[in-house]
Amino acid sequence: MARLKLSEDLRPLSDLKTQTSEVIQQAQESGRPVVLTRHGRGVAVVLSIEAFEDLQSSAERLQLQRAVEEAEQDIAEGRWVEHSEVMEKLKRWSAGEP
């Protein structure tokens, strides 16, 4: 997603009511979010589908990266379990045992 340009991407909320197509077109063509304002304060953001999908992908990658970092920290601090122990627990759980 392209970086927001305050000089171009802030629009009053009333534009969404009166110029809906133009607001959507701006988001699609620029690849940037359009920030809708009310009384000079941001209240909502309009994104193209592509920008929204990119944002979701970035969030998913960040979540995975954090999980990996947490796992690496656990390993470094000695908090880990042998594979055989994990497999044994999985077998017991699938059999309905605690």
Image (cartoon, rainbow, N blue to C red):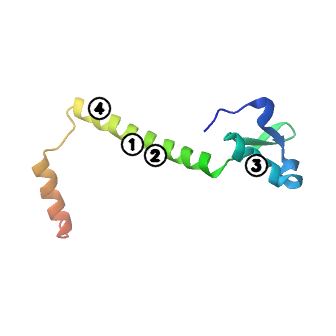
Q: Which of pointers 3 and 4 lies earlier in the amino acid sequence?
A: 3
Residue drawn at point x = 60 percent, y = 39 percent = 1
Q: Mark 3 touching mark 4, by CB under 8 A?
A: no
Q: CA distance from mark 1 to mark 3?
A: 33 Å
Q: Which residue is mark 4?
A: 73
Q: Which residue is mark 3?
A: 25
Name the element at disc 1: helix
Q: Badge 2, how many Cα within 10 Å: few under 14, some, many 20+?
A: few
Residue drawn at point x = 73 percent, y = 31 percent = 5
Q: Give the percent coordinates (x, y) of residue 82.
A: 13, 45
Q: Amino acid at mark 1?
A: Leu
Q: Mark 2 touching mark 1, by CB under 8 A?
A: yes
Q: CA distance from mark 3 to mark 4?
A: 45 Å
Q: Badge 4, how many Cα within 10 Å: few under 14, some, many 20+?
A: few
Q: CA distance from mark 4 to mark 1?
A: 14 Å
Q: CA distance from mark 2 to mark 1?
A: 6 Å
Q: Amino acid at mark 4?
A: Gln
Q: Amino acid at mark 2?
A: Glu
Q: Amino acid at mark 3?
A: Gln
Q: Which is in the foreground here, disc 1 or disc 3?
A: 3
Q: Give the percent coordinates (x, y) of residue 40.
A: 85, 36
Q: Which residue is mark 2?
A: 60
Name the quarter where the C terminus is drawn.
bottom left
Q: Which residue is mark 1?
A: 64
Which numbered tag is attached to residue 47?
none
Q: Give the percent coordinates (x, y) of residue 97.
A: 17, 67
